[in-house]
Image (spheres, helix red, strand yellow):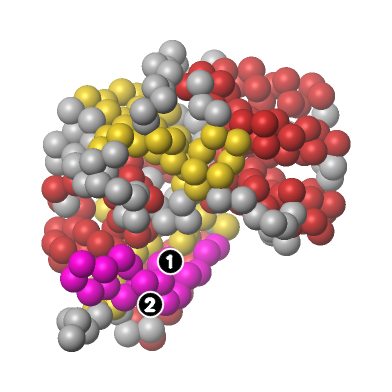
C-alpha cells in the first residue's frame, strides 16, 4: 500500500501573472494537481516603464497573493512555497515589494535568482522524462527567458537567462492586429537582446514550457498539438499578423490577455528556434511550480535551497 499523499502549494509571482498550484505528493510519484488559479497582475509593465513596482500595482498583487494563499489553505495544503521572478529581480524596490507581499500572504516570498528559476522549471518540466537524457528547456516568461541545458535527474550544466519576455515585447504593439511597423519593431527589439547562442545538436531533446509556449498551439484550434514545430510557429505568426485578438480567441478559447502576451512571446520563440537550429519543441504543461512543490515536499521551509539548484556548471546572462 502506497504512502498517503500530502498536499502542498506553490505560488509563482511572475512578471505577467501570479499563479497558484495546489498538488498532492507522495514518495516516488509526480505532483498531482488539485487546484490552479491565475491572475494577470503584470508587475513587469510597471518595471519596464519606471524601473519599479508602483503602489497601485503592488496593492493589486498583495490582494491577489492573499486570495491565493487563502484558497490554498481552504484546499488543505500543508505548506506553501512562494517565489518571485524577473519583475522583482529587476525592480529597484524589489526587496520592499517582496516584504509587502510576504506580509499580505503571511508567508515568506523568495526572490529567485535566474539559476534557481531555471532549475525549478527544468525539474518540473522534465519530471516525466527518461533520466540521463540531454535536454534543453525553453521557458519564456513575461520579462525574462530561461534556457537550461542538462541531463534529466542531474544538476543543470548551463543556463542562459535572457532579459527579454513576452510582456516586454507585447508592449511595443498597440494596434490589433499589430501593424507591419510594430512587427518590425518587436523583431528588432528582440534581436538586439538575444546574445549569440550555440546551436543544439541532434542528440539533445528540446522541451518548451510556460504560458506562451504551451498556449501557442491552441491558437490554431483543435486538435491541440503536444509538439510545436518550427513551421507551425511560422504559420501561427502569419495568422497573428492578419487576425485580431478576438478572432484568435474565438477559434482557440484562449483569453485575450494571454493571446496579447503570445504576440510578444512568439517573436522571441521564432528567433530562438532559428538561432538554436530547433526544428521542433516538445511541450510540457508542467514547469516552475511543479518543481517548487516537489522541492517543498523534500526540503520544507528551505525549499529554495533544493540540491537541483546548487551545482550548475556554467551560466550566462543576456
Residue at 51 percent across and 27 percent down: it is 278
Give the quadrant of residue 279. top right
Q: Which residue, given by chain and number where applicable, does mark 2 sit on? A: 72
Residue at 56 percent across and 50 percent down: it is 226
**Vertical placement of residue 207 versus 102, above or below:** above
Give the quadrant of residue 240. top right
Q: Can residue 63 be seen in this snapshot?
A: no
Q: Do the residues labelled 1 and 2 touch (CB within 8 Å)?
A: yes
- Report whether 14 appears left or right of 280: left
Give the quadrant of residue 256. bottom right
**Vertical placement of residue 166 versus 69, above or below:** above
Residue at disc 2, secondary structure? helix
The mark found on residue 20 in the picture is 1
The quadrant in which the C terminus is found is top left
Q: What stretch is highlighted in magenta?
A: 20-39
Residue at 14 percent across and 36 percent down: it is 311
- Report whether 64 appears left or right of 244: left
Residue 4 located within the stretch drawn in magenta: no
Q: What x and y, as percent, mark residue 216? A: 64, 46
- Number of residues whose C-alpha sits closer than 10 Å to that of mark 1, classed few (under 14), some (14–19) or many (20 or more): many
Q: What x and y, as percent, mark residue 304? A: 20, 53
- For the residues marked 1 and 2, what is the alpha-carbon distance in whole angstroms? 8 Å
Amino acid at each position: 500500500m502506497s504512502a498517503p499523499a500530502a498536499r502542498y502549494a506553490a505560488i509563482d509571482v511572475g512578471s505577467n501573472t501570479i499563479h497558484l498550484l495546489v498538488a498532492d505528493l507522495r514518495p516516488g510519484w509526480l505532483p498531482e494537481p488539485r487546484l490552479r488559479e491565475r491572475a494577470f497582475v503584470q508587475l513587469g509593465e510597471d518595471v519596464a516603464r519606471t524601473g519599479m513596482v508602483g503602489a497601485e500595482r503592488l496593492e493589486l498583487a498583495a490582494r491577489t497573493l492573499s486570495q491565493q494563499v487563502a484558497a490554498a489553505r481552504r484546499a488543505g495544503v500543508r505548506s506553501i512555497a512562494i517565489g518571485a521572478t524577473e519583475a522583482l529581480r529587476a525592480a529597484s524596490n524589489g526587496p520592499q515589494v517582496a516584504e509587502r507581499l510576504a506580509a499580505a500572504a503571511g508567508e515568506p516570498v523568495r526572490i529567485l535568482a535566474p539559476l534557481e528559476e531555471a532549475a525549478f522549471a527544468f525539474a518540473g518540466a522534465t519530471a516525466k522524462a527518461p533520466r540521463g537524457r540531454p535536454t534543453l528547456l525553453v521557458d519564456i516568461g513575461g520579462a525574462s527567458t530561461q534556457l537550461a541545458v542538462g541531463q534529466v535527474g542531474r544538476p543543470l550544466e548551463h543556463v542562459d537567462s535572457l532579459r527579454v519576455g513576452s510582456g516586454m515585447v507585447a508592449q511595443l504593439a498597440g494596434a490589433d492586429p499589430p501593424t507591419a511597423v510594430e512587427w518590425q519593431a518587436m523583431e528588432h527589439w528582440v534581436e538586439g537582446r538575444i546574445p549569440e547562442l550555440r546551436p543544439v545538436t541532434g542528440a539533445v531533446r528540446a522541451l518548451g514550457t510556460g504560458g506562451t509556449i504551451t498556449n501557442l498551439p491552441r491558437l490554431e484550434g483543435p486538435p491541440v498539438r503536444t509538439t510545436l514545430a518550427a513551421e507551425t510557429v511560422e504559420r501561427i505568426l502569419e495568422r497573428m499578423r492578419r487576425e485580431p485578438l478576438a478572432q484568435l480567441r474565438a477559434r482557440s478559447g484562449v483569453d485575450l490577455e494571454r493571446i496579447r502576451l503570445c504576440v510578444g512571446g512568439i517573436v522571441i520563440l521564432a528567433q530562438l528556434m532559428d538561432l538554436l537550429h530547433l526544428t521542433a519543441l516538445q511541450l510540457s504543461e508542467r514547469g516552475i511550480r511543479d518543481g517548487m512543490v516537489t522541492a517543498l515536499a523534500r526540503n520544507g521551509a528551505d525549499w529554495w535551497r533544493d540540491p537541483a539548484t546548487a551545482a550548475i556548471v556554467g551560466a550566462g546572462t543576456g
